[in-house]
Image (spheres, rainbow, N blue to C red):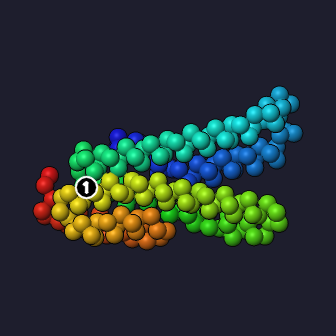
Amino acid sequence: MRKFLQLLPLILFPYMYMIVFAVVMMLGNYTDVINEGVSRFLDQYGLLLILATIVVSNTWSFVIAIVNSLSASKGKIDVRKACYWNMLIKLIQIPAYIINFIIGLFSFALSVWGVGFLIWVVIVDLLTIFYTGINAIGACVASSKQKVWPKRVTVLFGFLNFIYCVDVCVAIVMYVKTRYTKQISD
């Protein structure tokens, strides 16, 4: 449970953008209903708060991915656990990818704003796959050190963890293999 809480910002990274987007849309539509002071505050500092949230979320997720990857590659996290968390992160993020895809499809219906939404969706998807790919490298290195896979397969899996949709399949294969491998030292 502790590890889950440590990885929670990385797990929820793509969802954070959806929450920020929903809050901005909601507050943008209802600022006249909210009192005048809140409305003035949002007009002055709303964009700054959104940018600060995005910067903090990106930095936090990046640091967590690096720390988890280094911990797994140095053997501080069991290879089975590293592969399990890698798979779980990628599986939990599937609905976010689907929602981003739907937003991207609807962005074509919006005139000029559609280009902005499309760019936003692509950037969020790329950052998400980048952060989970960094996290997966630790699992790949740990499985290579434990002789679960030959080095060339580990390098291939490390590369495939950065390819959209293939990364989920690779994460599942890595976890299943480490789960049923007897030679892993506990």
Element under label 1?
helix
Q: Left or right? Give the position of 38 relative to 130.
A: right
Vertical placement of 114 versus 127: above or below?
A: below
Residue at position x 80%, y 33% from top?
A: 44
Q: Give the image location of residue 158, x and y in percent.
A: 36, 63
Examine the rendered structure and indicate whether residue 48 appears above or below residue 180: above
Return the x and y of residue 185 as percentages of the image width and height: 13, 55
In screen coordinates, is 97 left or right of 141? right
Q: On the rendered structure, is 35 left or right of 61?
A: right
Residue at the spot x=24%, y=60% of the render?
Answer: 143
Q: Is residue 45 visible?
A: yes
Outermost residue toward the top?
37
Residue 58, percent across and down?
54, 45
The residue that mark 1 highlights is: 142
Q: Amino acid at mark 1?
A: Ala
Residue at 37%, 57% (x, y): give it.
136
Percent x, y of residue 51: 67, 41
Q: Residues within 10 Å of mark 1 (few under 14, many from 20)?
A: many
**Can residue 38 be seen from the camera position used here?**
no
Please tell me whether residue 50 is drawn above or below residue 128 in the rendered image. Answer: above
Q: How many labels were placed on the picture?
A: 1
User: Where is residue 91, by image quadrant?
Assistant: bottom left
The quarter of the rendered structure image containing the N terminus is top left
Q: Is residue 130 above or below residue 173?
A: above
Which of 119 and 177 lies nearest the eye of the viewer?
119
- Say which of 49 and 134 sits in front: 134
The structure residue drawn at horizontal position 37% and vertical position 43%, both measured from the top left corner, is: 67
